[in-house]
Amino acid sequence: MSNLLITGANGQLGSELRKLSAGYPHHRFFFTDVAELDITRPAAINDFLDGNGIRTVINCAAYTAVDKAEEAEQSAALINAEAVAHLALACNRRQAALIHISTDYVYDGRACIPYREEHPAAPLSAYGRTKLAGERAASSVAKHVILRTSWLYSAFGNNFVKTMLRLGRERESVNVVFDQTGTPTYAADLARCIMTVVEKDRENQFVPGVFHFSGEGVCSWYDFAHAVMRLAGLKCTVRPVETKDYPALAARPQYSVLNKARIKATYGVAIPHWSESLEQCLREIG
């Protein structure tokens, strides 16, 4: 029996891990959000890890309000960087593993081929900077896996897919940028990837490092929105617009396709095409 702590458990990824947990009776899961565990307080972390014999921490907690972070970078850094440093220190003291979730926003989006993990990070936004700082903190743990992902969505919480479904029912048309390219990631797929890493650790096959995980394939936000409307049977017209026509406080990487060769080779992870996962999510939403 291995004891696992999941932080940020009320978010999209934490909710998917909660669903999966029933299939892993040989693990004991501790699902926490800020009400149960404030990860900005080192004493609270130490007490929780000691009191529950935690051997693996899966950090799903994050400040994800990308535009708001431009005006509140200190608040974003508190969750995305400082709290990660506290978790890292606590894990190192106990020789526990840390699985930390990061983002494609650590890149500047100026590449033209999928990003490999070793590509230099150059975030354009406060959100990206604080997440990169969190990566650096997490990498101090002897047993760490950092998973960079992109365009996360699920049947839980607020996300692009659910926004498109709502707008598709309310409007005749919607404008979506077509000059930002990446890959949508179904949180359920990422949750399964995380549990693959956890199981490899149980088999003494844990390989530390930075890994990329997103859906297979490539699309623009426009393509993604168009697929949502089509698969959901909505008549709303999706109109392509340029980023400059959709002003936002934070700069987004225009190209953030991730190369997943390392996670597939190292952990044997199978990744579905983003469109297949989208169909599955829409069935889940109903």
Image (tube, grey):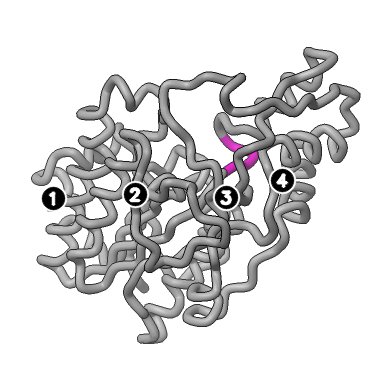
Q: CA distance from mark 4 to mark 2?
A: 32 Å
Residue beneath label 2, please? Answer: 122
Q: Left of 204 or right of it: where is 286?
A: right
Residue beneath label 1, please? Answer: 47
Q: Where is residue 10, by image quadrant? A: top left
Sequence-wise, which precedes: disc 3 or disc 4?
3
117 is higher (above) or lower (below) than 5: below
- Say few, some or many: other residues with alpha carbon within 10 Å of mark 3 (under 14 / 14 to 19 / 20 or more): many
56 is higher (above) or lower (below) than 204: above
Sequence-wise, which precedes: disc 2 or disc 1?
1
Q: CA distance from mark 3 to mark 4?
A: 9 Å
* Secondary structure beneath label 1: helix
Q: Which mark is residue 187?
A: 3
Q: Which mark is residue 229?
A: none
Q: Residue at x 13, y 52 (%)?
A: 46
Residue beneath label 4, please? Answer: 281
Sequence-wise, which precedes: disc 1 or disc 3?
1
Q: Relative to the observer, which residue lies in front, 268 or 222?
A: 222
Q: Residue at x 78, y 13 (%)?
A: 170
Q: CA distance from mark 1 to mark 4?
A: 37 Å
Q: Is residue 153 magenta?
A: yes
Mark 1: amino acid: Asp
Q: CA distance from mark 3 to mark 2?
A: 25 Å
Which contiguous range is marked in magenta?
A: 152-156
Q: Residue at x 36, y 86 (%)?
A: 204
Sequence-wise, which precedes: disc 4 or disc 2?
2
